[in-house]
Image: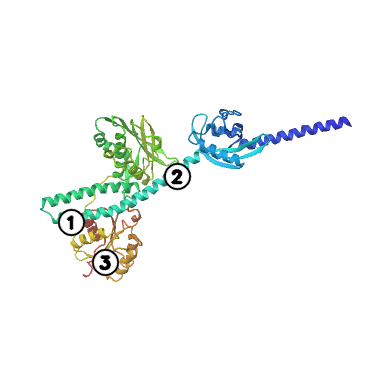
Amino acid sequence: ALYARRVGGELERIASEERLAETRRALETLIDNLPGAVYRCGFTPARAPVEYLSPAAERVFADASAVPLGDPDQGLTAFVVPEDRPRVWREIAAAARRGGAYELEYRVHDATGELRWVLDVGRAVDGPGGRRLEGVLFDITERRALEAQLTHSQRMEALGRLAGGVAHDFNNLLTAVSGYAEMLARRVRGNEKGERAAREILKAVDRAADLTRQLLTFSRRQKVEPRVLHLNETLRDLAGMLERLLGEDVRLHLELGSGAGTIRADPGQLEQVVLNLVVNARDAMPRGGDLRIRTRAARDADGTPAAVIEVEDTGEGIAPELRDRIFEPFFTTKTEDRGTGLGLATVYGIVTQAGGRVEVESEVGRGSTFRVVWPAASGAAAESAPGPIAEAAEGAGRAVALVEDDPAVRDLAADCLGELGYRVLSFSTGEEAEAALDREPRIDLLVSDVVMPGMRGPELLRRLRRRWPQLPAVFVSGHAGDQLADLETDRALFLQKPFRLADLEAAVSRAVELGGDRAPGPPA
C-alpha cells in the first residue's frame, strides 16, 4: 500500500509537471505570437534594467540579442534616441512611483542603427523582488510614416486653398488695374509719356498675373486644356531652350527611354514642370555640374501605366529637415534675387492636378533627383493648331446682364461693354440679377463671375435658360473652369482673370455668335 501511494504520488507529480510545462509552452506561444515585444524590467530611481524580453523583440530591434538582459547600465531607455530619452524616463518614472500605467510613443535605434517608432504600453507592478515594469513594445514606424504623409497632404491642401483664395482676390484687383490702364492708353493715344506710363502699368500687371497663375496652379484651380502628348518629342523640342537656360557651366544630358510613350497634359503646363525642375537643379549647382533628364515607362503601385520623368543634378542636395517643405508656396532656401519660392509648388500643383505625383531623393553634398510620375495616355499625340481669334463686334443695343460681386471689376466691364454699344444691366449677386431680370422682356447675353456669395454663375445661367433656352454666357473668374465643363460646349465661354479688354470684347462677340441668329433686344 505504501509503495502504491508513492507510485501514485510520483505519477501525480509527473502529470502536474507536464501540465505546468504545457501551460508554459502555451503561454510562450501566446507571447511569441503577440504583435509586440513583451518585456519586464526592474526599477530604481536611476534606471530600469531589462530582465525579460520576448522573441518578438526582433521586430522592433532587428536583433533581440542586442538588448543585454540584467545589465544594470543598459536599462529600458538605453536604446531610446537621446532627444526622446528625458521625456520617456520622466513619464515612466512618474508612473512607477505612483504604481500606475503608462502609454507613450518614442523613437529607438535598432541593432542596424535604423530609426524606428515604438508604442510602449506598460504598468508598474509590485512583487517579491520589489517594484517592476511590465509592458509591451509595438513597432509603429509604418503608422507614423502614414500619419506624417497624411499631415503633409492636409497641410499642402490647406495651403492650396489659401493660395487659391489669395490668387482669386488678387486677380480681381489686377483685372481692374489692367482694364483701366488699357482705357487710359486708348485715351492718351498720341501722348508719348502717357502711353509709356500705361505700358509700364500693363507690364507690371503681366508680371503679377504670372505669380497668380502659379498660385492657381499650385492650388489646382488653373484652367487647363490637356491633350495627348509624346513625352520624348516634347522634351527634345525643349532641349535648346533648356541649354540656354542652364548656361555654360551646367551640362545637359537627355536620356530618353524609347518606351516612355504618351501622356495627357496641357502642353504649357508640362513645359512649366520641366522648366521649373531644371531651374531648381541649375540653382543647386552654383559652381556648375551635370543635369540629367531621364524618361521611362513604369507602372504605378496599382498597376496603372505611367510615364516617369527624372531630373537629376549633382548639386548641394536638400537637408532632410527641409524635404517636407520644399513644395510649399513661397518656401525657398534661395536668396531673394534667385526665386519666389513658387517653382516647386507649381510643379506639385500641376502634377497632382493631372493625377500624378512628385517624389524626391536627395543627399546633402551629392545632389537631388526629382521624379515625376505621370499617368500614361492611350492614343496618338494630337497636332496643335491655333484657333481663330474672334474680332470684337459692336453691341448694337443688345442687352447684357453683367453679374460680378467685385465693384471695381463690375464697373470696368460695364464701361467696356457700354463703349461697344451694349445695353448693360449690372448686378452684384445672382439673386439680385434673377429677381431684376424677371421683369426684362429679353436679354441677349449673360456675363457673370463664377464664384460669388450665394448663387454662383453656372446656377444663375441654368435658371435664366428656363426662360431663354438659347441664352449664351461668358463666365469670368480667377478660379478654374472645372465646374464649367458641362457648359463649355453649350453656348458658354470661360475668361480667366486678369483679362485684357480685347479678350473681354472678343469673348463677348464670340458668345453672341454662339447664341445664334437672335435680333438685338428692345432698347431701354
Tell which of 52 and 492 is nearer to you.
Answer: 52
The location of residue 177, given as percent across then percent down, is 22, 54
Quadrant assignment for the N terminus: top right
Query: What residue does disc 3 label?
Result: 443
Disc number for residue 150 = 2
Of tags 3 and 2, which is closer to the observer?
Answer: 2
- 10 Å neighbourhood of mark 3: few (<14), some, or many (≥20)? many
Q: Give the amino acid type for the residue marked by disc 2 in the picture.
A: Leu
- Type of amino acid at the residue the image marks with label 1: Met
**Residue position for label 1:** 183
Q: Answer with left or right where residue 361 lies relative to residue 252.
A: right
Q: Are marks 3 and 2 in contact (CB under 8 Å)?
A: no
Report the number of discs.
3
Identify the image quadrant of the C terminus: bottom left
Residue 517 is labelled as: none
Nearer the N terminus, badge 1 or badge 2?
2
Q: Amino acid at mark 3?
A: Ile
Give the side of residue 37 with respect to residue 238, left or right. Answer: right
- Residue sitting at the far left: 190
Colouring rule applied to residues: rainbow
In three-dimensional space, the C-alpha distance between marks 1 and 3, rounded to whole angstroms, equals 26 Å
The percent coordinates of residue 346 (x first, y second) are: 33, 44
Does 244 sit above or below residue 180? above
SS class of the residue under badge 1? helix
Left or right, residue 480 beside residue 8: left
